Amino acid sequence: MKFSDYLDVHPDVEEAIKNGEPIVALESTIISHGMPYPKNIETAMMVEETVRSNKAVPATIAIINGRLKVGLTHEEIEFLATNDEVRKVSRRDLAITVSQKHSGSTTVAATMIIAKLAEIAVFATGGIGGVHRGAEKTLDISADLEELANTNVCVVCAGAKAILDIGLTLEYLETKGVPVIGYKTTELPAFYSSESGFDVDYKIDSALEIAEILKTKWSLGVDGGVLVTNPIPVGYELESSIMNEAINQAIIEAEKEHITGKKITPFLLSKVSEITEGKSLDANIKLIQNNANLAAKIALHYSKQD
């Protein structure tokens, strides 16, 4: 069997691929594990509409009953948002979930794999996974980083999730040769905040320039992803000191409850939202929309490259 035997492509996405139109891949973990109902559905639909409003085609990616889905119907989004048995799927889980005909939402890593196989070059998400705080003891490092090192997809995000060790995450990306671009910023955004205290590799001020970099990189045969970091809009960001306090408190609670592995990120995000009385959730929604907006612009320019 080949990849296409496991794949269902939404007609709108299939038409866009055939015609060389701009497409933006979107992950589905946020639907099943990242936000409470019904915010998860509302956000998923809003992000898709943001992509469309920028003249690109949204392709939300997931696995449903063992089928790789590139582009979802409203009913499929509803299914992911309300079914407690939906798995969180990264690279290691992909073959098993498909083989056993289970359903799963895709992380950054799994979304990148499927997007690349479907020939989609640009992907918008909230924040990437990375090196977790305390990784020197736990070795907890997200598969997202390894995927960025190897898979030719541009990932547009608001930086690494604020619950991570951002400095070590950048060191890992440097070791793997992943360029980290700041969109109109020299400082790596820290998800809920535009400030992290760490510099990006390059500041680029236009979606056109980013599209040209993608085309050049892959034309040169330099495999691997490109990370585009896009600060949360001014007015929606949260003070880094407040967020760090909330994150530290959430980490302490996770340790008390022995939360580890793939459960840690959803737990911490949920706990931080609880501690900040929903402010972090509102910021999360706004930054995802902002990233989809930029990703669509990059995809539009990329599709016009020779």
Image: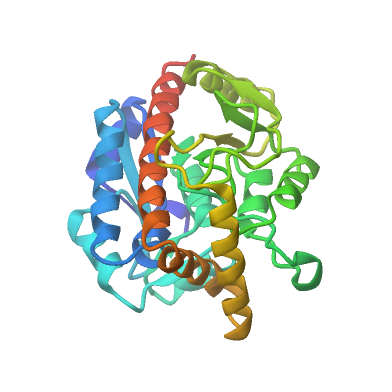
The spot of residue 61 in percent (x, y) is 38, 52
Which residue extends farthest top?
Answer: 306
Q: From the viewer's perspective, is 6 left or right of 92? A: left
* Along the viewing direction, whichever of 41 and 74 lies nearer the viewer: 41
- For the point 34% across and 44% down, the residue is 59
Q: Position of residue 106 (x, y in %)?
A: 45, 59
Residue farthest bottom in this picture: 257
Residue displayed at 31% across by 26% down: 19
Reply above or below: 64 against 213.
Answer: below
**Residue 129 picture quarter:** bottom right
Query: Image quarter for residue 217?
Result: top right
Q: How many marks are shown on the rendered structure?
A: 0
| Foreground residue among 44 and 177 | 44
Q: Position of residue 162 (x, y in %)?
A: 58, 53
Left or right, 88 with reference to 136: left
> Is 231 above or below relative to 30?
above
Q: Is residue 213 left or right of residue 80?
A: right
Residue at far left of view? 75
- Does residue 179 show up? yes
Residue at the image point whose x is 45% and y is 46% from the top: 125
x%, y% of residue 104?
40, 67
Q: Foreground residue, 191 or 7?
A: 191
User: Which residue is painted at 34% across and 49% down in the image?
Assistant: 60
206 sits to left or right of 135: left
Q: Is residue 118 above or below residue 213?
A: below
Q: Is residue 260 visible?
A: no
